[in-house]
Image (tube, rainbow, N blue to C red):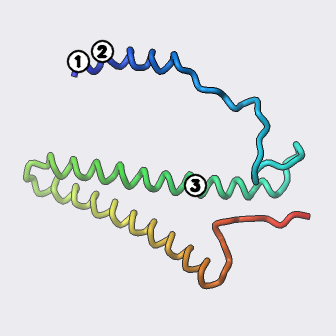
Amino acid sequence: MLKRLKLLPVLSLISLTFPKTSFAQTAWTGRCVANTDVATIQGLECLFYNLLQIISYAAGLAFFIMFIIGGFNYLFSSNDQKKVAAASSTLTMAIVGLVGIVISWLVILFINNFTGVNIIDFTIPGP
């Protein structure tokens, strides 16, 4: 363990010797960037899209963390019934959350296939 901790600064220095290029000075293109510098209502499209992305990643990360914590709590419960019940409750809630995420995604796909309206591709009509 101590050898791994001594190796960490060496690896971080090696990673700093190979810098990556920055795209801060290049021109942006895509659906979220208009040709003008003035903010318009179409900026809400990108905001809504980015919020959906962040929420879905956060939900997946929360499931993973809850599942790992519940597993470790179950593993180290040492046959104490209260700890086992708490760990199994954590695992159950993690799985219920994952099922909720999957069901919500399936409902969105069902709406898309049934009505033909793509609600994931949120667009605001322009002038």
Q: Is residue 49 above or below residue 106?
A: above
Nearer the observer, 79 or 54: 54
Which residue has dot 1 on it?
2
- Residue at 34% x, 60% y is 94
The x and y percentages for residue 19 are 57, 21
The x and y percentages for residue 84 are 16, 56
Q: Is residue 109 above or below residue 80?
A: below
Which residue has dot 3 on it?
53
The amino acid beneath tag 2 is: Lys
The x and y percentages for residue 52 are 59, 58
| Distance of label 2 from label 3 (alpha carbons) | 37 Å
| Distance of label 2 from label 1 (alpha carbons) | 6 Å
First in sequence: mark 2 or mark 3?
2
The answer to which quarter of the image holds residue 42 is bottom right
In this picture, residue 20 sits left or right of residue 67 = right
The answer to which quarter of the image holds residue 92 is bottom left
The answer to which quarter of the image holds residue 27 is top right
| Distance of label 3 from label 1 (alpha carbons) | 39 Å
Of helix, strand and loop, which one carries label 1?
helix
The amino acid beneath tag 1 is: Leu
First in sequence: mark 3 or mark 1?
1
- Residue at 84% x, 49% y is 34
Cβ atoms at labels 3 and 1 below 8 Å apart: no
- Residue at 76% x, 54% y is 31
Cβ atoms at labels 2 and 1 below 8 Å apart: yes
User: Which quarter of the rendering shows the N terminus?
Assistant: top left
Which residue has dot 2 on it?
6
